[in-house]
Image (cartoon, helix red, strand yellow):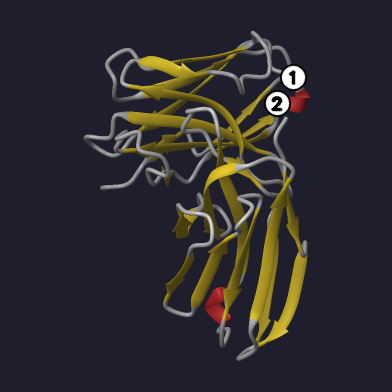
Amino acid sequence: GQQLNQSPQSMFIQEGEDVSMNCTSSSIFNTWLWYKQDPGEGPVLLIALYKAGELTSNGRLTAQFGITRKDSFLNISASIPSDVGIYFCAGQPQGGSEKLVFGKGTKLTVNP
Amino acid sequence: GAGVSQTPSNKVTEKGKYVELRCDPISGHTALYWYRQSLGQGPEFLIYFQGTGAADDSGLPNDRFFAVRPEGSVSTLKIQRTERGDSAVYLCASSTGRGRGGDEQFFGPGTRLTVL
């Protein structure tokens, strides 16, 4: 089935540093999404990307939908302690279904 | 509250038993989704409803899993003859169901199922 390869698996950074994570796929996705999940809660949408090449920002977060429609990255600038959590990329595959395919997540730890 | 709610928050059962997990979507949302999240993994799609009907059930792993949404609001995920491998967090999400692609899915906190 369709899979998203997300990297890195985990990151340990100092407060104030920038962070970058990415997702790749062997198949085309119509939409790319980035979610954050805190312990005991469901994922919360951070950024949604709908067009190939699209670059979108949400505060300190920036994400891009790759030209080939098979990849996306998320950057977090000037990290703060509350950025701690697990970040997931997700894609909506071609075919008309509204289902999402998720990556395995990037666990972010920010040291104050 | 205004968000997606799921009950119970935790369920412990024995191998072979039947369980039901409930999801209350955001009021007015016509689309409802079920995902399963194993430890250290991302959510894995199971089934989604548009109104009362299952629009895509391709993620249900086998015929022990079944979901209903009889009135187009609350949904119940039913698992028969539970196995230890069914242990996971079961997440429910809902969206407005406009179907234009990328319609934001709002997730509930999940039900943690443990099969002993």
Residue at position x 59%, y 74% from top?
A75
Q: Residues within 10 Å of mark 2 (few under 14, many from 20)?
A: some
**Do tags 1 and 2 sit on the same chain?**
yes
- For disc 2, the marked residue is B86
Q: Chain of mark 1?
A: B
Vertical placement of residue B72 versus B7, above or below: above
Q: Position of residue B65 (x, y in %)?
A: 60, 15
- Compared across the picture, whether B75 is left or right of A1 comes to left
The total number of labels drawn is 2
Q: Nearer the viewer, residue A30 or B111?
A: A30
Q: Is residue A24 visible?
A: yes
SS at badge 2: helix
Contact? badges 1 and 2 (CB < 8 Å): yes
Q: Is residue A95 above or below residue A25?
A: above
Residue type at mark 1 is: Glu
**Left or right, residue A98 beside residue A85:** left
Q: Nearer the viewer, residue A105 or B112?
A: A105
Crowding at mark 1 (Cα within 10 Å: few <14, some 14-19, many 20+): some
Return the x and y of residue A49 as percentages of the image width and height: 47, 56
Residue depicted at x 58% and y 58%: A39
Element under label 1? loop
